Image: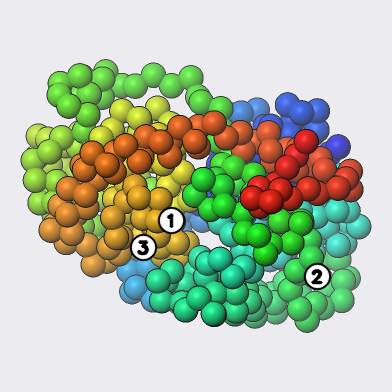
Amino acid sequence: MKIAVVTYGTEGDARPLAALCRALDDAGHSSVFLADASTLGTARRLGVRTQALDGDIRGAVGTGGAIANVVASNRPAAAAQALADIANASATAWLRQIVETARSCDAIVCSGLAAFVGLSAAEALRVPVIGAGMFPLTPTHCFASPFLPPAQVPRLLRRASHHLVNAMLWRAFRAAVNTARAEVCDLPPRRRMWTTHPMVYGFSPSLVPRPLDWPANAMVCGQWVPPAPDWQPPPALNAFLAAGEPPLYVGFGSMTGFDAGRLRQAIINGVAGQRAVLQPGWSQMDVQGLPANFHVLGDAPHDWLFPRMSLVVHHGGSGTTHSAARSGVPSVVVPFAGDQFFWAHRLKQAGVAPDAVAGHRLRADDLARGIAFAGHSAVRTTARALGERMRAEDGLAQGVAAIDRILNTGPLLISRSGAHQLS
């Protein structure tokens, strides 16, 4: 089958779906991947056919961009609105691009900020549509919406919190989506968001077991990990790793807009002379004049790097969270926005991370306490066991099988434990 896979977001949003496209191609399908131009590198490396969507996500999250400004203000509602504004500004262009690219396709898989537009494109083309997520969106009693503080939602309101957040998101996107539907496809306006389409989730059941109250068409597949690149570490990194005990890792991915100078000093003081690998990412953190115990690193595959670390200090993005847990080492999570607090909470519940401290509040003593927690032998044993379980999962095979099952309208089987069976 020909399948269009659509998303819009940062590299962490695009990379898993690029891996899914490669797996679909290897299984005999023909995929095309649509995403922001700056996030298509993994797909191109994997030989996946690509199409760049209108926009500039890196500019939006970079210093002075719309997302950076609201992350710095520590206002989650404002950050959500800024994300909606990005999607709304491009909704018409995206819908036109998706419809044109997917005109010969048999199905659409959609995710991220482009999800509502992708759903509309499938409606216009009269092809099946499947939602994809790197965090849970389907309502459940088991946990609150990933966009709300996990510990602050009472048990009785967990399921309602999903409906509340989903309704708020739809209200933020609805006008622009309906305008695009009318202009590009001559479709009638939608008053309510889509709720009955199948969902495939690219996260680990070892971190988020499939809720028993989910409908049969919501499936937890496991993490979608791209094949390891043919990557050789720089000689300086090899020398640093060989010069002593495994270092700790510090990196915050595509996060930006925070007080990088203050956080830099908190990291230096919190690490307190221990060996550390620092990956600045998109933060524009000043790496000049760092103490000699730090090694600054550019892009490097987490699957190669993290198993060689003693622990991972990170922002709690879904991809980095999974890579850290799968590597079998503890985490110290410093979340900034969105679903990062959810993943921090899941790692704490798994026993491999301490309580998280938000990036805008992190102090040196917070980081030092987290590092001390991660050094406990019981925590390290738990992290190794979790890593073994996650490495045994094959999320891509499960994802392809789930999509095949959905498109072939075969039966969906749910075991007593709630795990999706793809036999």
Query: Residue 238, located in which quarter of the rendered image?
Result: top left
Three-letter residue code for mark 3: Phe
Query: Relative to the observer, which residue lies in front, 364 or 278?
Result: 364
Residue on which disc 2 sits = 181
Q: Residue at x 61, y 63 (%)?
A: 137
Q: Which residue carries the number 3 mark?
A: 336
Q: Secondary structure at mark 2?
A: helix
Q: CA distance from mark 1 to mark 3?
A: 16 Å
In the image, 136: left or right of 296?
right
Quick one: label 1 or label 3, which is nearer the N terminus? Answer: 3
Give residue 408's position: percent from left, percent from top.
Answer: 89, 43
Task: List x then y, in percent, for residue 258.
Answer: 29, 63
List the residue tagged with mark 1.
346
x 17%, y 48%: residue: 372
Labels 2 and 1: the sequence-earlier one = 2
Task: Give the crowd class for mark 2: few <14, some 14-19, many >=20 residues within 10 Å.
Answer: many
Which-is-in-front pick, marks 3 and 2?
A: 3
